[in-house]
Image (tube, rainbow, N blue to C red):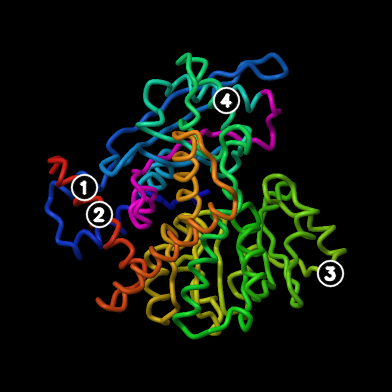
């Protein structure tokens, strides 16, 4: 999560302020979009397996719903904060708008560590979270989804609790469900694949063959795993992966110059994306400090872990060879680091464009649930590729036309769309 002293919401607001100036937004529109429309903070009492009671803190933030129901994941993390959730909800608003799907931005979370909780305890947290918000979420108002350290099982527990409370079936309430229980084929791959779809288009524009490139990745959760797989299919080679080690409570970088094999690494990875460093060493990986992923002599960097990872303090460690950064995580690069990256002419594919494959496929799942008809996997991924490619081309075209940094161009499109929707509704 966010490092001590770093406030992700202030960063999200600073990014918005910059674009609000570019768009010359009026004061009322700025005030409306700069802050969430609604926030919920609550307690979730749970009887633990040892018989004791423990109270967990939960959140849900609905940033803006002018373009449709709020949409956004639910994180379980011991360092979760309301400001992290606020920032993520704002980024979700821009993410839905940049890929032009009819949804707004929301985000949720619980301060907890699933590593130290039994399945029953996690289920009680899920059901308790829904009980607190049963009147404030729904398929036509706010549709949650999985995020950091939550999964399809958590979503199904939440759906079951919501349906129990309301006495009916609402498969469109929540996305990221198990396939066969209203989940969409292709959802597991969607975010990581979306990152690589945009990366593929960036390389095309730069006249670089994917097969001639080498990459370094931060993170080895769902997003990173599938990004690596698809990038490998395009002919690219990943030589370094960084991830958190739960046992040591620190991160490591795992380097293999002849190429990382996602499937073999997955065999020694826990369900939270943590790699067993001793087994990795036996498999020929060099174990390096956590930040070493950023310093590798590669063409492409893919930060796919958490926010606040490329900062003013470490941005100058990026190797001269790096040509592209594709942000698989939310908010991994600070505004100060952005200035350095822009000055170096590194092609930035910003987070809310690059990682929008997840929410796009969540939207597809929602559509399928609401019409009770489900598409085959190839159809889902084809629709995803079309959406991601279209969004990337629109942003890159504006960036070239107006001579804007890619992040600024993406913001101009997304904030402009949301501001117009608010204006059309008569909110400002």
- Judged by depth in the image, the label closer to the viewer, 1 or 3, is 1
Image: magenta residue range: 91-120
Q: Do the residues labelled 3 and 2 touch (CB within 8 Å)?
A: no
**Point 59% across, 48% down: residue:** 376
Looking at the image, is mark 4 or mark 2 earlier in the sequence? 4
Between discs 3 and 2, the one toward the N terminus: 3
Q: Which of 83 and 205 is in front in this view?
A: 205
Residue 417: assigned label: 2
Which residue in the structure is indicated by mark 4?
A: 125
Q: Circle 4 — which element?
A: helix
Q: What element carries label 3?
A: loop
The Cα atoms of the two marked residues, 1 and 3, are separated by 54 Å
Circle 3 Cα neighbour tier, 10 Å, few/some/many (<14 / 14–19 / ≥20): few
Question: CB of mark 1 within 8 Å of CB of mark 4?
Answer: no
Q: Is residue 210 above or below residue 331?
A: below
Q: Quadrant of the C terminus?
A: top left
Circle 3 residue? 284
Residue 120 x, y percent position in the rendering: 68, 23
Q: Which of marks 4 and 2 is in front?
A: 2
Q: In this view, does 332 lie above or below 72?
A: below
């Amino acid at each position: 999560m966010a490092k001590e002293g770093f406030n992700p919401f202030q960063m999200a607001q600073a990014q918005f302020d910059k674009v609000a100036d570019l768009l010359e937004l009026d004061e009322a529109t700025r005030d409306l979009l700069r802050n969430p429309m609604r926030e919920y903070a609550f307690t979730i009492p749970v009887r633990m397996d040892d018989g004791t009671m423990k109270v967990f803190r939960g959140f849900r933030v609905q940033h803006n719903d002018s373009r449709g129901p709020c949409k956004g994941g639910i994180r379980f993390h011991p360092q979760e904060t309301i400001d992290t959730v606020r920032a993520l909800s704002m980024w979700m608003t821009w993410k839905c708008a940049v890929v032009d799907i009819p949804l707004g931005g929301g985000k949720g979370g619980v301060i907890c560590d699933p590593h130290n909780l039994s399945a029953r305890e996690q289920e009680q947290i899920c059901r308790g979270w829904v009980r607190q918000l049963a009147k404030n979420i729904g398929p036509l108002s706010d549709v949650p989804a999985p995020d950091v350290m939550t999964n399809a099982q958590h979503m199904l527990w939440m759906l079951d609790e919501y349906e129990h409370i309301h006495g009916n079936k609402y498969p469109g309430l929540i996305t990221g469900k198990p396939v066969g229980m209203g989940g969409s084929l292709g959802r597991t791959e969607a975010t990581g694949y979306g990152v690589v779809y945009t990366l593929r288009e960036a390389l095309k524009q730069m006249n670089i063959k994917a097969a001639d490139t080498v990459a370094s990745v931060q993170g080895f959760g769902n997003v990173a795993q599938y990004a690596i797989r698809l990038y490998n299919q395009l002919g690219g080679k990943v030589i370094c992966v960084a991830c958190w080690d739960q046992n040591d409570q620190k991160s490591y970088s795992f380097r293999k110059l002849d190429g990382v094999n996602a499937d073999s690494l997955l065999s020694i990875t826990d369900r939270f994306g943590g790699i067993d460093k001793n087994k990795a060493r036996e498999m020929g990986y060099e174990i390096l400090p956590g930040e070493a992923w950023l310093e590798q002599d590669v063409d492409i960097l893919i930060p796919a872990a958490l926010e606040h990872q490329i900062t003013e303090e470490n941005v100058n460690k990026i190797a001269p060879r790096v040509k592209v950064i594709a942000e698989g995580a939310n908010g991994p690069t600070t505004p100060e680091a952005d200035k350095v990256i822009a000055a170096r002419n590194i092609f930035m594919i910003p987070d809310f464009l690059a990682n929008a494959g997840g929410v796009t496929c969540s939207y597809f799942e929602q559509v399928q649930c609401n019409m009770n008809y489900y598409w085959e996997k190839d159809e889902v991924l084809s629709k995803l590729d079309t959406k991601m490619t279209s969004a990337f081309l629109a942003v890159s075209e504006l960036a070239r036309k107006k001579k804007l940094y890619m992040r600024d161009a993406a913001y101009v499109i997304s904030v402009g769309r949301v501001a117009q929707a608010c204006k059309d509704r008569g909110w400002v």
